[in-house]
Image (cartoon, grey):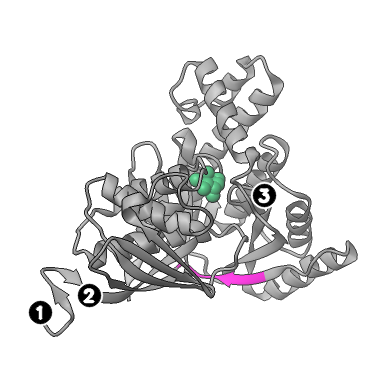
Amino acid sequence: MPADGRDAGRAMGGRWHAPGRVNLIGEHTDYNGGLVLPYALPQGVTVAGTRRDDDLLEIHSQGETRTVDLGEAAPGAVTGWAAYVAGVAGCLRAAGHPVGGAVLRFSSDLPQGAGVSSSAALECATAIALTGLYGLDVPREDLVEITQRAERDYAGVPCGILDQSASLLCRADHALLLDCRTGESAHIPLRLGEHRVLVVDTRAEHRHAGGGYADRRASCERAAEHLGVEFLCDVTDPRAVMSLPDPVLRRRARHVVTENQRVRTAADLLEKGALAEVGALLTESHVSLRDDYEVSWAEADVAVEAALAAGALGARMFGGGFGGSVLALAHRDAIAAVSDAVGKAFAERGWTVPGFLETTAGPAARAL
Ligand code: GAF
């Protein structure tokens, strides 16, 4: 075996990192065949792994150890956080990538439950660790599908490809403009100049394994069927949604169709450095998610209002909704005022103190 601990392309052991993400704009468009514009955070999930010569996954995280026999890993057979790890191993094998046992020690510097995609980071870290340990060269686009399948089948969340794509495909200092239908993508330089994106963890824990997310997805499928399109994002004229007989479906569809347009416009504006206009689109996105898609929550609405009143160019909830985080785009000199204003608004309501994270765009999942 060579001195670097590899045999036939396989690593005996190593460390890998997969990032969480912020989605600048493009919410609930991914499973509607639309556009998203996320960037990867420098923070994420790190895994130290070694290969085992049997079929056991020994998983360590936050002081807990779980052992899963890969021969018995199947949807529903593994519960809790270990399901994400076992799910990725099971889905890699089902896709014909012969991974085997491993000892995996996970750590994370992502805020839990904040909607910055800690579960996708866990899945993607597992995927690159196992494929690295077993010397398998699997294209990143395939890993996106495999990790998404793991989340859907093993964790029961009917998610799109936003989070896994962000973790596996983003580039440092860039946002990823991704067409979730065709898989086409472009790396858009995150030209923020003197501005920053502040993430506010509203401490309202985000849980989209619950019914809300699946319900929205089902509504979109019904609306698309009624409008005679495969995906709602095939509708380019927002007036077309007015033909939907059900007012709730109409609003859901209007969010998706207008949001898709906002992503395209925001990516163009970002390239030009027109940040005031990008900010206005972020706020429009929030209003649409709040009023039409109805996935916002009280803490997010208050955080957005307080951030705007304190001088942010724009602010919105991001992620699946029903809890999680808000982002605010603001001049770096206004960041302190924005966080103070949000903190004050929460204190006045007796809410838990929010968390703040000034973000930059980091690289995609990688070996360390
Ligand atoms: C969650 C899902 F996992 C994504 O696929 C996406 O649908 C997002 O909610 C909403 O844009 O993060």
Mark 1 residue type: Met
Q: Residues within 10 Å of mark 2 (few under 14, many from 20)?
A: some
Q: Earlier in the sequence, mark 2 or mark 1?
A: 1
- Is 243 drawn above or below residue 296 in the view shown? above
Check residue 322 for magenta coloring: no
Q: Which residues are magenta?
A: 356-361
- The image quarter containing residue 184 is top left
Between 213 and 126, the one nearer to me in the picture: 126
Between 279 and 57, the one nearer to me in the picture: 57
Which image quadrant: the N terminus?
bottom left
Q: Disc 2 and disc 1: Cα gap in Å?
A: 10 Å
Which image quadrant: the C terminus?
bottom left
Q: Residue at x 73, y 70 (%)?
A: 339
Q: Residues within 10 Å of mark 1 (few under 14, many from 20)?
A: few
Q: Which residue is mark 3?
A: 283
> Percent position (x, y) of residue 367?
30, 72
> Percent position (x, y) of residue 94?
28, 45
Q: Are marks 2 and 1 in contact (CB under 8 Å)?
A: yes
Q: Earlier in the sequence, mark 3 or mark 2?
A: 2
Label 2, ligand 1: CB separation under 8 Å? no
Q: Disc 3 and disc 1: Cα gap in Å?
A: 56 Å
Q: Residue at x 41, y 48 (%)?
A: 150
Name the front one of labels 3 and 1. 1
Left or right of residue 275, residue 251 in this image = right
Q: Which residue is mark 2?
A: 12
Between 317 and 150, the one nearer to me in the picture: 150
Q: Which residue is mark 1?
A: 1
> Tag 3's secondary structure?
helix
Q: Disc 3 and disc 2: Cα gap in Å?
A: 48 Å
